[in-house]
Amino acid sequence: MDLVSERLNVDDYDEAVELFYRNRWTDGLPIVLPTRGRVEAMIAASRRDPQQSLGPVPPKGGAATIEKLAINAVMGGCLPEHFPVVIAAMQAMMEPAHNLNGVLQTTHMCVSLVIVNGPNARRLGFNSRDGVFGNGYRANAAVGRAVRLALWNLGGAFPWDTDKSTLSHPGEYAFCIAEEEEDNPWRPLHVERGCPEGSDAVTVFACEGPHSVFCYGTPAEMLHVLTDSMCSLGNNNVHVLGQTLITLNPLNAEEFAKRGWSKDDIRRYLWEHARRRIGDVRACGVVHEQFRQMERDAGRYPHRYDLDNPTTRLPVTPTPDDIHIVVAGGRSYFAAVLPGWGGFGGFAVTRRIEWSS
Amino acid sequence: MEFLSPVWPAATTARPPKKRPVTLAGARVALVDDNLDIPFTTHLETLLTERTGAKVRRLVKPSGTAPSPSSLIDDAAGSDVAVVGIGL
């Protein structure tokens, strides 16, 4: 296999890891050493040309070739069968709608979440149940970290340089979940977004970390709590719309479905009710007001919301379809809200996973 | 023990920087408006014009959170000075 990356030699693993730290080729954690054999196995699993490029990774523009992605996937702990998921996630993030350049450098604390769907997610060991946003599962951790390392080494947005995230969140190390599709009464996310039933896909969405929502009871009770959690004045959606993500656990979903609620019904209800009065929003200050006006001037904030009318109640997204709903987690009392970056980007993009066979 | 580098080699050639003008008086200044803080950018435009005598031309980016289109960069590059990266 013809590979073009610089070859480096060290005496042992300890020396290699220290070299990675010195050169800032890692995110702060040790890595799996990208030996030629491991990298070739990764590339072979994709059956792609090693020099095929998915494009330049912002902000510094390093080419996301299959070879470089494979090196970073090895470093993150991926198995070769995980690699097609990494490729699909990178392709999705590099779509213009996601505005990766902005996501990687904004002062906001959003990070691109990778959501894996399809029958192969279970086979590959992705966790979609208890502790889904947490640790303990190689597939979630390795694919999540591989993507972050590829962005780190090819895009080069570092926190001491052009990554201006004020606080960021731990998803910078790895931020990858799978949707629970077996214990789920509804169509999975990727099918809702146009992929065929039974296909595999990833969806990326730039968002804050998961905010816990104590969500249990009847649909009316759950919706009451969810609406309040979605329109907290601190999140960007309240001020500049954009998209948001709701994670319902399988028990929540079952309770909704038993009483005839579809995901679209929930979206419409949340969109109508998760709103803030213009007075509450204005009280946040002139900077918020200025951003809202700029979004309006740029045509990204619908004019149907009369910002001068004191009775106006502002939604958190332009349309109900901008509220994404995923089923994941344990059968318990908690859901999560993950607000987005706002109208600036980070929007959800879905890409099919292309397996080699 | 051999392994492969995860990064691309740093570019070894950089274009030489444009010569800085001695004064801004009469200089053609491209003020690239990031569309993120319009009142601040307007204030800067006023200061540049009134205090230095620069001939300011304001180029507005479609989005403050995405790179400028290449046509805007080429346009700005034709000026004596470009002011970029204005934002919160």
Image (spheres, coloured by chain):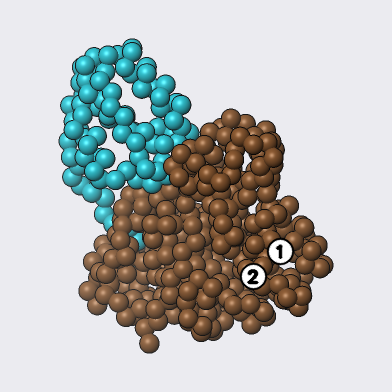
Please state which of residues A88 and B11 is positioned toward the viewer in this rendering.
A88
| Label placed on residue B2 | none
Q: Does label 2 or label 1 sit earlier along the sequence? A: 2
Q: Is residue A144 visible?
A: no
User: In the image, is residue B14 above or below residue A286?
Assistant: below
- The quadrant holding residue A220 is bottom right
Residue A310 in picture, x, y percent from top left = 68, 36
Residue B71 in picture, x, y percent from top left = 24, 43
Residue A144 in picture, x, y percent from top left = 50, 65
Disc 2 is placed on an element classified as helix
Q: Residue at x 23, y 49 (%)?
A: B11
Q: Residue at x 56, y 46 (%)?
A: A304
* Circles 2, 1 touching at the beta carbon (< 8 Å): no
User: In the image, is residue A118 above or below residue B9?
Assistant: below
Q: Residue at x 59, y 60 (%)?
A: A320
Please state which of residues A202 and A256 is positioned toward the viewer in this rendering.
A256
Q: Would you name the residue on which mark 2 appears? A: A263
Q: Residues within 10 Å of mark 1 (few under 14, many from 20)?
A: many
Q: Would you name the residue on which mark 1 appears? A: A335
Please state which of residues A113 and A344 is positioned toward the viewer in this rendering.
A344
User: In the image, is residue A292 above or below residue A75?
Assistant: above
- Image position of A191 (left or right of A246): left
Which residue type carries mark 2?
Lys
Tell me which chain the residue with mark 1 is part of.
A
Q: Are marks 2 and 1 on the same chain?
A: yes
Question: Chain A appears in which tint?
Answer: brown
The residues bearing labels 2 and 1 have C-alpha atoms spaced at a distance of: 15 Å
- Chain whose colour in the figure is cyan: B
Residue that extends furthest to the bottom in the rendered view of this protein? A357
Q: Nearer the viewer, mark 2 or mark 1?
A: 2
Q: Residue at x 26, y 62 (%)?
A: A6
